[in-house]
Amino acid sequence: MSIVVPVYNEQPNIEKFYEEATKAAVTLDMDYEIIFVDDGSKDATPLILSRLTQQDEHVRAFILARNFGHQLAITCGMDHALGDAVITMDGDLQHPPSMIPELVQKWREGNDVVQTIREATDDAGFLKRMTSKWYYRILNAVSPVHITPGGSDFRLIDKRVLETFKQFREHDRFIRGLIGDIGYTQTFIH
Ligand code: UDP
Ligand code: MG
């Protein structure tokens, strides 16, 4: 299992993320790697990553030459993933590592894509809920590619999907749209 994590100025969160992701990964009963992609951080993120790669052979790190943005940082990690499946997730703990076994379970049941969906919470605030709702409404009205509301880049994809995904080389990309439209057997976790 490859776990791909883009990080930009995540100095306060990386070690906690690493601990929680490791705790989840060791329960999987399979070999795993955690691939961090540093997206041009200006804090101690690359230093922490360098130390983690020395401490733990499960950790790999790519340090990008400058900030390229979340989507390209994820792409870098996906391009280098070696697993039979790849999980992408944020490094700021907004995507709970404790959910990793549930994603893997759905994959073992035969799903090629396991997409998580963020539940709207009351604490999101009125403005955030309204702008989010209309964002997806308008996007889906103007584009033939359906984008699931509340989707995120916290998902698992099988290696077969990864191989197809790698053939898309757009620089300015919206991975949610590419994966949502890629086919294969897809399922969702709320
Ligand atoms: N991130 C990145 N490059 C950027 C901005 C963010 O790699 O230019 C990383 C960030 O460290 C985090 C993930 O991408 O792990 C999501 O970013 P953020 O938390 O800012 O997004 P949001 O929570 O607002 O969706
Ligand atoms: Mg975040």
Image: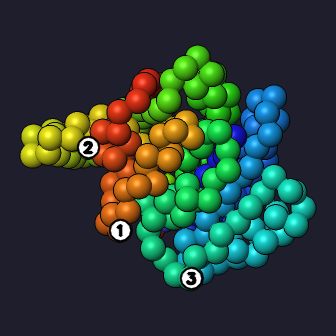
**Which residue type carries mark 1?**
His
Q: Describe residue 45's horizontal placement relative to residue 78 as left or right.
A: right
The x and y percentages for residue 184 are 41, 30
**In which quadrant will I find the N terminus?**
top right
Q: Which of pointers 1 and 3 indicates the residue nearer the eye?
A: 1
Q: Secondary structure at mark 3?
A: loop
Q: Which residue is mark 2?
A: 132
- Label 3 crowd bin: few (<14), some (14–19), many (20+), radius 10 Å: few
Residue 111 in view in this figure:
yes
The x and y percentages for residue 145 are 21, 41
The x and y percentages for residue 95 are 56, 42
Q: Which residue is mark 3?
A: 65
Q: Which mark is residue 127?
A: none
- Give the residue at x 61% y 65%: 37
C-alpha span from label 1 to label 3: 16 Å
- Label 1 crowd bin: few (<14), some (14–19), many (20+), radius 10 Å: few
- 74 relative to 62, above or below: above
- 140 relative to 101, above or below: below
Q: Which mark is residue 171?
A: 1
Instruction: Determine whether label 3 and label 2 are within 8 Å by CB.
Output: no
- Give the residue at x 65% y 39%: 84
Residue 126 in view in this figure:
no
Closer to the camera in the image, 83 or 62: 83
- Give the residue at x 71% y 52%: 34
**In which quadrant will I find the C terminus?**
top left
Instruction: Determine whether label 1 and label 3 are within 8 Å by CB.
Output: no
C-alpha span from label 1 to label 2: 25 Å
- Label 2 crowd bin: few (<14), some (14–19), many (20+), radius 10 Å: some
